[in-house]
Amino acid sequence: MKRVEAIIRSDRLGEVAACLEQASLSGFTISDVRGHGRAPSGAGEYRGHTYELLVTHKLLVTVYVEDGEVDLAVGAISAGASTGQVGDGLIAVSTVDSMYRISGSTAP
């Protein structure tokens, strides 16, 4: 089993969810994250003072898939998240040794 984690622009969530659904991968988790990467930093204003934003708001989308579904998940997320600009995000894949459902499970 694999965990596919993607950091994406928050405004691309609808497209990513639709692409995952189309690939029959409808179960995913979303977390709000902040970070600093290759995207240019922006500027904010508070009480008339301009300041540089060192981090940007993104979403972390996590999908658990079988080993044979990794390419399908990565392709769906890439298709939904891509705008062709710097700062679209990144995808990481890691191995999950075991997973247990909480409802009705008998964990070791």
Image: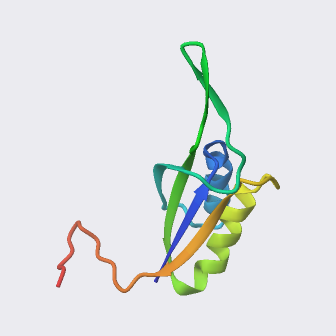
Identify the residue at image location x=65%, y=55%.
16
Left or right: 102 in relation to 95: left
Query: Could you say where residue 80 lies in the image, as x and y percent from the top left?
Result: 71, 56
Query: Could you say where residue 41 lies in the image, as x and y percent from the top left?
Result: 67, 43
- Of 42 and 14, nearer the camera is 42
| Colour theme | rainbow
Query: Could you say where residue 3 lies in the image, as x and y percent from the top left?
Result: 48, 74
In the figure, residue 6 lies in which quadrant? bottom right
Identify the residue at image location x=37%, y=86%.
97
- Of 43 and 34, nearer the camera is 43
Identify the residue at image location x=79%, y=52%.
83
Identify the residue at image location x=51%, y=82%.
66
- Of 93 and 56, nearer the camera is 56
Left or right: 42 in relation to 33: right
Q: How many marks?
A: 0
Query: Could you say where residue 57 lies in the image, as x and y percent from the top left?
Result: 56, 43
Left or right: 83 in relation to 32: right
Report the residue that reaches farthest toward the right: 84
In the figure, residue 42 lies in which quadrant? top right
Looking at the figure, which quarter contains the C terminus? bottom left
